[in-house]
Image: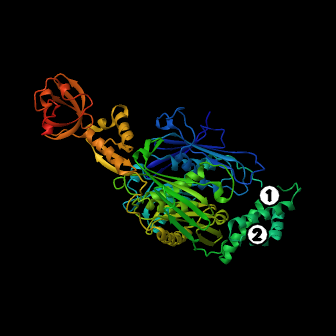
């Protein structure tokens, strides 16, 4: 019934298996990839007809993790997988980026790729395996995919590179780098580093590239056995349009691209586009999309030629020049930390909010419930580019936020040094190139403004590339148009001395390590310049947190007293919070954290906790309250929830006939601890007054 094709390879002692022919046979390409007990089903399906109204390549990649893969039932009311988690979105982007540039420009058929984790052993990560599985599924689908691609993860432990390290190994690694590409070149890099040098990062990319070449060869052998017939790709002849547009609009476009202001330039290009479409109005042989496509190609040739031949950029800068930078801090009076970072026509308002461990983000995943004390949220409203549009958190927002998170994370102080939870929000208010790197710079400033003792300031810069044959130019601090019309988006973030994050996306079939080396060197020069500009506003963290920041204090209680502080169903800790106005958090080790906006609230909460957990000391006098009257004496509450007995003979220095002759319920009294009897405390009112 099944005609199964199978291939396998061993990489660093781990066997990777590819199989097709048994499951999802109606997909154009379907591959089961296994590593250990982690299994990914990757399918690829392409629409057989092109939507004539689409002028882009409609590729969608939706990575999915099924909770049954790890033997779990999802949380929540509906108990089923719902919208993609942040992790699923980031991995979807990770898969999309290396495969997208490997489809021909003329291919506009809709393609849907669905990598699904159906078994997970908590040891072998599914992200790298998913890239491999998707690459294999596309390679056998018959679609015009110029792959296959391979991928690997690289760690850096004790000065040595480690290929595809385990989760345990990554805890001791100064690097977590994912690299993907073809046999000839690298197409995508995503990384978080702990201050590595440019040379160390470049060697890590080389190491990862060498590591996945055997996997590409395995996929090629696999595809030779079971690849479906190649799709016939039709290409429309637009040579007549190309000649006419070059003749009529080259000068106008050159004038537009010599205009430095983005909005004016956009308006001029829009007018040219309208004129070009009118030329072919009513011509049934060509559509508006044909005109737009060839006009974009003309724009691309004009900008790229000017950069390569004349070293002229759109805004007149030199290839390595960074746009003017303006930094301000403390711009929002009630915010714990804030900064305004402006670089040319890119601008971000970035804020830092500090909270307690109660504010940590809880994340449910196949590995179980985890907590995250550092959150960075990036918002990109449409007004930042002078447009209208939908408001929400899309893949772009999640991806850019995570890139900035990686850049900043290694510079944050440990919980032991600074016990706060961090939330950074970046509001992009203007955008013309690399708002994610503006977010990195603004985040560093906002953290320092909030009094967070970061290890070193961090800045980021986006690099671009124009390449024709062997001729190339590397651009620093690229504009939006240079990104759109160029061949590379290469983002580098770090401190004065080292790289903390590196992200690279290539739009051509790959770049050489020579180009990458030059880009890293040029990026360092730019990064150091930006850090110098940032230092003019604030060069180190403020000595203390701001006046509106909750002040924290920690005390340690005996583990036996944790239940006392929390109370039945949390009643006691709620009472402390309500009466004091402070925020109280207790962990399993008996560490109590009290946070409050003012000293009075904090001290009141601390005293209530100390009273609850304090132990009665012999001969010490305490304030108490009469709780119950008996014939033989009165029970007095002191030290919060502790009771002791004042015998009738210890009420006064004279004979007392009735307890109520001296005290009644609710009276505030001073009592002295005069002894202990089988765990019960003996108190005296008369001795407390001596």
Q: Which mark is residue 534?
A: none
Percent of width and height locating residue 262: 68, 66
Q: Nearer the viewer, residue 279 or 344?
A: 344
The single residue placed furthest to the top in the displayed view is: 631
Residue at the spot 66% in from the left edge and 73% down from the top edge: 307
Give above or below for 425 relative to 531.
above
Q: CA distance from mark 2 to mark 1?
A: 18 Å
Question: Is residue 504 visible in the rendered structure shown here?
Answer: no
- Where does label 2 land, which residue? 253
Q: Quadrant of the C terminus?
A: top left
386 to 309, vertically: above or below = above
Q: Is residue 104 visible?
A: yes
Residue 628: which quarter of the image?
top left
Residue 588 appears left or right of 516: left
Q: Nearer the viewer, mark 2 or mark 1?
A: 2
- Label 2: element kind: helix
The residue furthest left is 654
- Pick out the residue farthest to the bottom: 310
**SS category of the residue bearing label 1:** helix
The picture places residue 685, in percent across and down from the top left corner, at 16, 34
Image quadrant holding the N terminus, namely top right
Tell me the quarter of the picture where residue 456 sits. bottom left
**Circle 1 Cα neighbour tier, 10 Å, few/some/many (<14 / 14–19 / ≥20):** some
Q: How is the image coloured?
A: rainbow
Q: From the top left corner, tell me how far across and down residue 379 is, in percent.
A: 58, 53
Residue 96 position, x and y percent, is 60, 52
Q: Give residue 290's mark.
A: 1
657 displayed left or right of 408: left
């Amino acid at each position: 019934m099944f005609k199964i094709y199978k291939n396998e390879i061993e990489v660093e002692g781990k066997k990777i298996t590819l199989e097709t022919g048994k499951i999802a046979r109606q997909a154009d390409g379907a591959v089961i990839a296994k590593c250990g007990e982690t299994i990914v089903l990757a399918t690829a399906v392409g629409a057989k007809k092109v939507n004539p109204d689409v002028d882009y390549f409609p590729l969608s990649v939706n990575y999915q993790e099924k909770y049954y893969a790890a033997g779990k039932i999802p949380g929540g009311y509906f108990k089923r997988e719902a919208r993609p988690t942040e992790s699923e979105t980031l991995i979807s982007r990770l898969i999309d980026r290396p495969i997208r540039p490997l489809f021909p420009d003329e291919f506009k058929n809709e393609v849907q790729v669905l990598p699904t984790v159906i078994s997970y052993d908590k040891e072998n990560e599914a992200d790298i395996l998913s890239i491999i599985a998707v690459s294999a599924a596309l390679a056998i689908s018959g679609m015009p995919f110029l792959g296959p691609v391979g991928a690997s993860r690289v760690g850096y432990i004790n000065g040595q590179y480690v290929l595809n390290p385990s989760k345990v190994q990554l805890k001791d690694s100064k690097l977590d780098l994912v690299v993907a590409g073809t046999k000839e070149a690298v197409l995508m890099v995503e990384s978080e580093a702990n201050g590595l040098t440019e040379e160390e990062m470049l060697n890590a990319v080389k190491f990862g590239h060498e590591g996945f070449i055997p996997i590409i060869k395995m996929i090629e052998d696999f595809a030779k056995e079971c690849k479906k017939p190649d799709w016939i790709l039709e290409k429309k002849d637009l040579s007549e349009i190309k000649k006419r547009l070059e003749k009529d609009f080259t000068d106008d476009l050159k004038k537009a691209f010599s205009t430095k202001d983005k909005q004016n330039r956009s308006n001029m290009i829009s007018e040219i586009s309208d004129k070009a479409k009118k030329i072919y109005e009513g011509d049934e042989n060509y559509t508006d999309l044909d005109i737009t496509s060839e006009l974009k190609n003309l724009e691309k040739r004009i900008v790229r030629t000017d950069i390569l031949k004349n070293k002229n950029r759109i805004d007149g800068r030199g290839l390595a020049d960074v746009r003017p930078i303006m930094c301000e801090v403390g711009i929002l009076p009630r915010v714990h930390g804030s900064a305004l970072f402006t670089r040319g026509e890119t601008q971000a308002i970035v804020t830092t909010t500090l909270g307690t461990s109660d504010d940590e983000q809880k994340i449910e995943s196949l590995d179980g419930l985890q907590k995250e004390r550092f959150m960075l949220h990036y918002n990109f409203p449409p007004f930042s580019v002078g447009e209208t549009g939908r408001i929400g958190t899309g893949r772009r927002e999640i991806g850019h936020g995570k890139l900035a998170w990686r850049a900043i994370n290694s510079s944050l102080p440990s919980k032991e040094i600074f016990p706060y939870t961090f939330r950074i929000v970046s509001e992009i208010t203007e955008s013309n190139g690399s708002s994610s790197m503006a977010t990195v710079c603004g985040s560093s400033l906002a953290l320092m403004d909030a009094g967070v003792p970061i290890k070193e300031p961090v800045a980021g810069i986006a690099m671009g590339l124009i390449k024709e044959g062997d001729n190339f130019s590397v651009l620093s601090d690229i504009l939006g148009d240079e990104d759109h019309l160029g061949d590379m988006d290469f983002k580098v973030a770090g401190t004065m001395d080292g790289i903390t994050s590196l992200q690279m996306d290539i739009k051509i079939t790959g770049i050489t390590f020579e180009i990458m080396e030059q880009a890293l060197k040029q990026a360092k020069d730019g990064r150091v310049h930006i850090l110098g500009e940032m230092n003019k506003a604030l060069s180190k963290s403020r000595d203390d947190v701001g006046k509106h920041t909750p002040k924290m204090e920690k005390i340690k209680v005996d583990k036996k007293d944790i239940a006392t502080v929390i109370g039945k169903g949390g009643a006691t800790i709620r009472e402390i919070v309500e009466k004091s106005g402070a925020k109280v958090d207790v962990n399993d080790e008996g560490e109590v954290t009290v946070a409050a906006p003012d000293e009075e609230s904090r001290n009141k909460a601390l005293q209530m906790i100390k009273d609850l957990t304090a132990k009665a000391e012999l001969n010490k006098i305490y304030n108490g309250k009469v709780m119950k009257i008996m014939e033989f004496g009165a029970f007095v509450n002191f030290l919060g929830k502790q009771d002791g007995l004042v015998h009738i003979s210890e009420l006064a220095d004279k004979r007392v006939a009735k307890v109520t002759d001296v005290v009644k319920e609710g009276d505030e009294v001073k009592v002295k601890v005069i002894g202990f009897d089988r765990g019960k405390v003996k108190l005296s009112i008369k001795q407390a007054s001596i």
